[in-house]
């Protein structure tokens, strides 16, 4: 694992911890920084990180706190407080 990937993992941990402490602006800062590191190094964010960030407002999503999670027609639908929807398939398709 190279330095950039390790930095992204560390920023993921920091964003999760900041969101758990209700420091949403700090968590958003870590998410934006991780996106910049990934972009500059031509990396994709890990799936576990991508699934917990809002594409519109860069918030770190915590189901039940700032995100609503619903199952609908073979998809997981995650709705952020800003109103953005994200859908992920589940099961055999």
Image (tube, grey):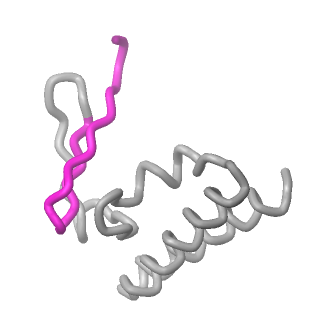
Please count the marks in the image: 0
Q: Residue at x 32, y 34 (%)?
A: 88
**Relative to 22, 34 lies left or right:** right
Q: Quadrant of residue 73?
A: top left
Q: Residue 80 in the image: x percent, y percent?
A: 22, 61
Q: Position of residue 67 (x, y in %)?
A: 23, 61
Residue extending farthest to the front is 40
Magenta span of residues: 76-93
15 lies left or right of 76: right
Query: Image point 14% across, 60% down: which residue?
Result: 83
Q: Residue furthest top?
A: 93
Give above or below for 13 relative to 51. Answer: below
The residue lying at 50 percent from left, 70 percent from top is: 31
| Residue 86 vertical position relative to residue 59 in the rendered view, above or below | above
Residue at position x 40%, y 88% in the image: 23
Q: Nearer the viewer, residue 53 or 55?
A: 55
The percent position of residue 47, horizontal first and vertical second, equals 53, 44
Q: Which of the 4 quarters of the picture holds residue 36?
A: bottom right
Image height of 68 relative to 21, above or below: above
The answer to whether residue 85 is magenta is yes
Q: Quadrant of the C terminus?
A: top left
- Return the residue nearer the eye: 1 or 62: 1
Left or right: residue 22 versus residue 11 is left
């Amino acid at each position: 694992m190279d330095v950039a990937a390790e930095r992204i993992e560390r920023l993921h941990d920091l964003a999760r911890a900041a969101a758990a402490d209700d420091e949403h602006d700090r968590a958003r800062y870590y998410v934006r920084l991780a996106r910049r590191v990934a972009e500059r190094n031509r990396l994709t964010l890990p799936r576990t990180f991508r699934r917990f960030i809002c594409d519109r407002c860069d918030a770190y999503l915590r189901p039940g706190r700032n995100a609503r999670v619903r199952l609908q027609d073979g998809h997981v639908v995650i709705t952020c407080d800003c109103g953005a929807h994200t859908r992920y398939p589940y099961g055999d398709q």
